[in-house]
Image (cartoon, helix red, strand yellow):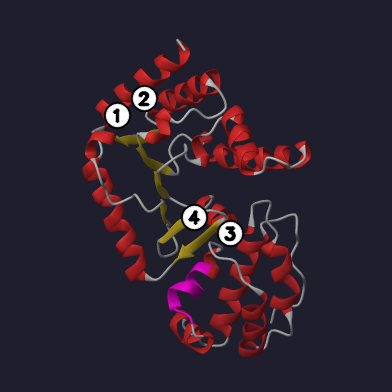
Amino acid sequence: MPRKNLDPSSSPRALLGAELRVARERAGLSQAELGERLFVSGSFIGQLEAGTRRMHLDFARQIDDILDTGGFFVRNCGAAAKSKYPDHFAEAAEAEARAKTIRDYAPQLLPGLLQTEAYARAVCRAYQPTATEEVINELVESRLVRAALLADPTTPMLWCVFDEAVLRREVGSSKVMAEALRHVIALIKSHRIIVQVIPFSAGAHAGMMGLIKLMSFDDAPPLSYAEGNGTGQLFDDPATVARHVLNYDLLTASALPPRESLAMIESAAKDYEHA
């Protein structure tokens, strides 16, 4: 039975997941069997153990009772749940940091992983026009920390599909847009990311309802994330994830090939530079 609290300076969620796996196996339960007692799927238990999903307090209480862990998970789930991201996006951001592959569809704005500081600041200020500079600085910093994932030369594999509106909507200023698009161009040309653009001429397409993010992992089932205005939900249900995968496949079919997409992004960048 786990007895010591987790070290908050380590990765609390990963450590909590590892302790859950040990406690579950000690109790002689499979992931599916523990999931059945918690009224969740076995894949959800796998994601808790892999650290890709957050353990909420109600689950922690039930797990302590089922696995007879003496309140360990209740004591420690608070540390594992702390996040610098908005509540509706926290789980998705933390899963993103562990993903092997990420596929992003962006209908209006550059995905957070590709935003420059100036672009992110303009977006955050538009969302919260009366917030203090301190609040905006914290939001921008958290977005830049996410973008640091791309410092690794190969992982995660990032494939983005943009609506053409992403290129045409001026965020911040012409200078901010030119810098942001040049950043994307540099990542494409260095073979770090794959980008496709859905032109306005494509007409109606499968992504008109909003953002889609797909994530796969080495040690856990895939997840999908859908977001609205100030809301978001992470999905692990196989049928829902499969539907989102199909939507993404339809989006790539509607989009320009990568080479033509790059040409469109470069043209837009030049237009902003000459504005």
Viewer can see residue 199: no
Crowd rating for badge 3 (residues with CA inside 10 Å; few <14, some 14–19, many 20+) = some
- In this figure, which residue is indicated by the disc labeled 4? 228
- In this figure, which residue is indicated by the disc labeled 1? 261
Q: Which mark is residue 88?
A: 3
Q: Earlier in the sequence, mark 4 or mark 1?
A: 4
Instruction: Indicate the amino acid at tag 3.
Output: His
- In this figure, which residue is indicated by the disc labeled 2? 265
Instruction: Indicate the amino acid at tag 4.
Output: Gly
- Residue 181 vertical placement versus 43 (above, below): above
Residue 221, percent from left and from top: 41, 65
Crowd rating for badge 2 (residues with CA inside 10 Å; few <14, some 14–19, many 20+) = many
Residue 120, percent from left and from top: 59, 35
Circles 4 and 1: CB atoms closer than 8 Å: no
In the rendered image, residue 77 lying in the magenta stretch gets the answer no
| Highlighted magenta segment, given as a residue range | 40-47
Circles 2 and 4: CB atoms closer than 8 Å: no
Q: Single out the residue that lies furthest toward the front.
A: 130
Determine the main secondary structure of the stretch shown in magenta: helix
| Number of numbered callouts drawn | 4
Crowd rating for badge 1 (residues with CA inside 10 Å; few <14, some 14–19, many 20+) = many
Q: Earlier in the sequence, mark 2 or mark 3?
A: 3
Q: CA distance from mark 4 to mark 3?
A: 10 Å
Q: Earlier in the sequence, mark 3 or mark 1?
A: 3
Identify the residue shown where x is 53% and y is 85%.
38
Instruction: Indicate the amino acid at tag 2.
Output: Ile
